Amino acid sequence: MPCPRCGEPFVTAAAFRRHLATGHGMARRAHQPVGRLQRWWDSLGYLSLWFVVPLDALAVLTVFALVDRVHTELAVVAAGMATLPLVLVLSHRVFRQ
């Protein structure tokens, strides 16, 4: 089987893999199991901003309205913390691998 990059012929798959790793810098990465947190982080990419932004705005307004009865400054802090879903989805879009 010839190398698709340079055309050098190989008889064994092991020699071909060594050639790719040393000659072309294409070392095969070991399969790493994906944990729960990684699967959850990857799933954030499927959420549409058209879904998250209105839902998050509704959550912020609800939290602010409920906590404002107790304390106004606490309501502002709680409403800021209610933006976490939007922050997570946006950070996934910026920092995904």
Image (tube, helix red, strand yellow):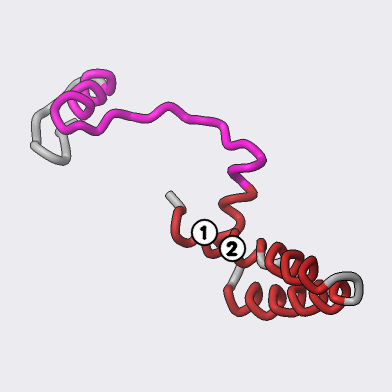
Q: Tag 1: residue type?
A: Ser
78 lies above or below 23: below
Please state which amino acid type lies under the numbered disc 2: Val
What secondary structure is found at the residue carrying circle 2? helix
Point out which mark residue 87 bears.
Answer: 2
The reply to whether the magenta stretch includes residue 92 is: no
Dividing the picture into quarters, in which one does residue 45 lie? bottom right
Cβ–Cβ below 8 Å for labels 1 and 2? yes
> Mark 1 packing: few (<14 Cα in 10 Å), some, or many (20+)?
some
Magenta-drawn segment = 13-39
The location of residue 55, given as percent across then percent down, is 72, 76
User: Depth check: 15 or 42 in front?
Assistant: 42
- Measured from the top left, where is residue 28 in percent x and y? 33, 29
> Which image quarter holds the N terminus?
top left
Residue 83 in the figure: left or right of residue 68: left
**Residue under the image location 79 percent in, 66 percent down:** 74
Q: Residue at 80%, 74% (x, y): give it.
A: 72
Report if residue 15 lies within the magenta region. Answer: yes
Residue 11 picture quarter: top left
- In percent of width and height, residue 81 lies at 70, 62
At numbered mark 1, what does the secondary structure look like: helix, strand or loop? Answer: helix
Check the image and report above or below for 40 versus 80.
above
Give the x, y percent position of residue 4: 16, 40
Q: Dot 2, crowdedness within 10 Å: few (<14), some or many (≥20)?
A: some
Q: Can you say whether 67 is above or below 11 in the image?
A: below
Residue bearing the label numbered 1: 91
Determine the residue positioned at 58% across, 63% down.
89
Distance in Å between CA atoms under marks 1 and 2: 6 Å
